[in-house]
Image (cartoon, rainbow, N blue to C red):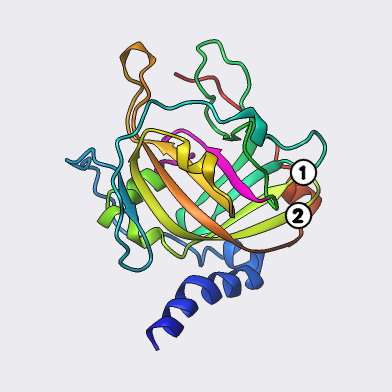
Amino acid sequence: MRALVDRLRYRLLPALLAAAGVSLVAAGLLSYTVPVDATPSASDTPIAVLPTPTPTQLLTFPPLVSPSPTLAASPGAVALATRVVIPSLSIDLPVIEQPTTPNGHPPCNVAMYLDGLQQPGQLGATYLYAHARTGMFLPILDASKINNGRRMLGMLIQVYTADDQVYLYDAVEVRRHITTLDAAVAEKRESLWLQTSEGPYLPNDKVGPKTQVIALPLGHGPADHQDAHPKAKPVFCG
């Protein structure tokens, strides 16, 4: 019985929400109303939160490194991610390739995909990241501070692609205080990884810890062309 309840909660409910379509989003029925504790966690030990109690192995992570170029998709093989929507967190951002910025930092007001990893529909990790700022991925960081982000488990995530498709994902894991891309690079499943920072840039360009949300695919289908091609307006920010 517990397995059936878990399946209804983590798989069928997001699918039903997706089937309800844009009307739920437009009507504002999907909202995230849990109060946010702004106090940072006192622990800097990597934490992973799963839908069911699962032993988590804690590792000593090396510095963040770029993913292996051998994992990159062949040019033109797949359509690129263009938009990410998380209705329950009121997140709706265009997705772009990270441009060159004057300060070398990712721009604001957009999410970006990580070159060298995968795109929706491919085996491996589709890796999207954005600043933890208002109008961007700040709700992910805020939610992660409450019970290690457990309330984000089971939330629906939509990723649109340049070929007018929308991919639906079910959030299955939250990881905090992460300082390496190793797990995403090694991922063999078709999956979506969202990343945001847990604090400001550190001195000497040292990589600070990140929060990751990992989601698995529910399915995909056609999307309106305008919905799949939002106008990106990146702002160069520090």
Q: Nearer the viewer, residue 181 or 162?
A: 181
> Residue 223 at what x, y percent from top left?
76, 57
At 36% from the left and 28% from the top, the residue drawn is: 62
C-alpha distance separating marks 1 and 2: 9 Å
Q: Which residue is mark 1?
A: 79
Q: Is residue 136 magenta?
A: yes
Q: Are marks 1 and 2 in contact (CB under 8 Å)?
A: yes
- Extreme residue in the left direction: 42
Vertical side of 3 occupied by 232: above or below: above
Image: magenta residue range = 123-138
From the viewer's perspective, is 70 left or right of 183? right
Q: Nearer the viewer, residue 231 or 160?
A: 160
Q: Look at the image and tell me whether residue 46 can be seen.
A: yes
Quadrant for residue 24, please give it. bottom right
From the viewer's perspective, is 161 left or right of 64? right
- Residue 165 numbered tag: 2
> Residue 182 at what x, y percent from top left?
46, 37
> Residue 113 at what x, y percent from top left?
61, 36
User: Along the polypeptide, which appears first: circle 1 or circle 2?
Assistant: 1
> Residue 107 at what x, y percent from top left?
54, 25
Vertical side of 85 occupied by 112: above or below: above
Determine crowd level at label 2: few under 14, some 14-19, many 20+ residues with C-alpha closer than 10 A: many
